[in-house]
Image (cartoon, grey):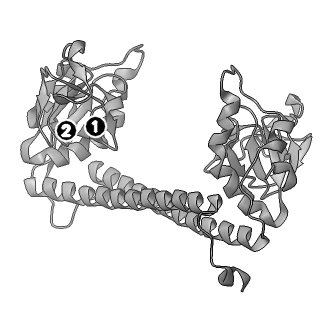
Amino acid sequence: MALEAVAKMTMGQSPRGSSYNEDGVGMPLIRGNADIEARRTKQRLWTTQPTKKCRAGDIIITVRAPVGHTAVASSSSCLGRGVCSLAAGSDNRFLFHALVHTEREWAVYEQGSTFTAVNSDEIRRFAIPWPPEPFQRCEIALALDHADDLVDALDRLIIKKQAMKQGLGEHIFAGQMRLSGFSGEWSDVALGDVATVEMGQSPPGSTYNQSDGLPLIQGNADIQDRSATGRVRTTQPIKICAPGDVILTVRAPVGFAAYAPHSACLGRGVCSLNAQDDNRFLFHSLVFAERDWAIYEQGSTFASVNSTEIRSFRLGWPADEDERASIARLLDAADEEIRVLKQRRAKAVGIKKGMMQELLSGRTCLPVAKAAA
């Protein structure tokens, strides 16, 4: 079904630049993708001379690169020329899901174009899946809204747990909180006094490949979710880390901490640290000390640290090994809780995508009896 057959469209028109402000005076201005976050419009600029307007709940589509990104208007707003709005009455929620489902089909307008944009005629002709019966559209929208609600709830829970872990770690490593049963001294130690430092050295580029040898850790790009997994391999590793070693970036960004889930080759953008039984405590300590490396980035075009600077880096270190182990277990448990929540979120997103494929293609229909009740 063509968009013009199911929705009223309003193309954006930028107001005068002199009317823009960041003080909340006038009407929020939606200019493009930068004013969209998590499928909702966000307020960054306001205008006292709005031209074209949308209502809260209207569907917003970007008409300039990236073309076709879909969101919902959080409030009545002014439409800049980088967006348009669509209103389909009671079918707004179905229209939103249908447009999200078909976003990739706008890519045809981006091929061979330096500055991608679509005009009103192209938007009006854009085809979307449209079940013939209103109750079908209502039930599909409701089912997909429920799926979105689950993802949103998990997002909020993940953010809450991350904030709780951050606060916990900051209090522990700042000395503002002690775990029950521990009262021993903490020492200010040099990193080289508690861990063995192995500086990286890049192997010959001709040995890089995708399947043979050891994973190569070259820098921050080879770290994901604090795990140094690598993107390429090398058949001639020079410096090697062991599973469980702490990985630290030594080139911009300096001091980003991760761990090695397996043996890997260390490129010159990283080093490995081994504190034996204290590796997990060392990892968490370095994560919460990352901002302290900023001194090495001041006034430098290309920030880096050498082995001497790494070995002399100062950390708080409990004298009691049981306290170090207890802190590590507590923060590991917090990380595991967050990891499980992220897995649940990924599964929920996958289920929602599957629902969209089935319901918006017509391959699966919701029960008529339930919809008609």
In the image, residue 67 sits, relative to residue 166, either above or below, namely above
Query: How far from the left and from the top, in percent, is residue 7?
Result: 85, 54
Q: Amino acid at mark 2?
A: Val
Q: Amino acid at mark 1?
A: Ala
Q: How many marks?
A: 2
Q: Secondary structure at mark 1?
A: strand
The residue at 80%/37% (across/down) is 21
Mark 1 neighbour density, 10 Å: few (under 14) some (14–19) many (20 or more):
many
For residue 312, say whether it is visible.
no
- Relative depth, front residue between 206 and 62: 206
Q: Which picture quadrant has residue 23? A: top right
Left or right: 246 as drawn, with respect to 161: left
Q: Secondary structure at mark 2?
A: strand
Disc 1 vs disc 2: Cβ atoms closer than 8 Å? yes
Query: How far from the left and from the top, in percent, is residue 313?
Result: 22, 30
Tell me the distance, in whole angstroms, between the alpha carbons under discs 1 and 2. Answer: 7 Å
Left or right: 236 as drawn, with respect to 134: left
Residue labelled with disc 1: 257
In the image, residue 112 sits, relative to residue 90, either above or below, namely above
| Quadrant of the rendering where the C terminus is positioned | bottom right
Residue labelled with disc 2: 246
The residue at 38%/15% (across/down) is 302
The residue at 38%/55% (across/down) is 167
Could you say which disc has been placed on residue 111 in the image?
A: none
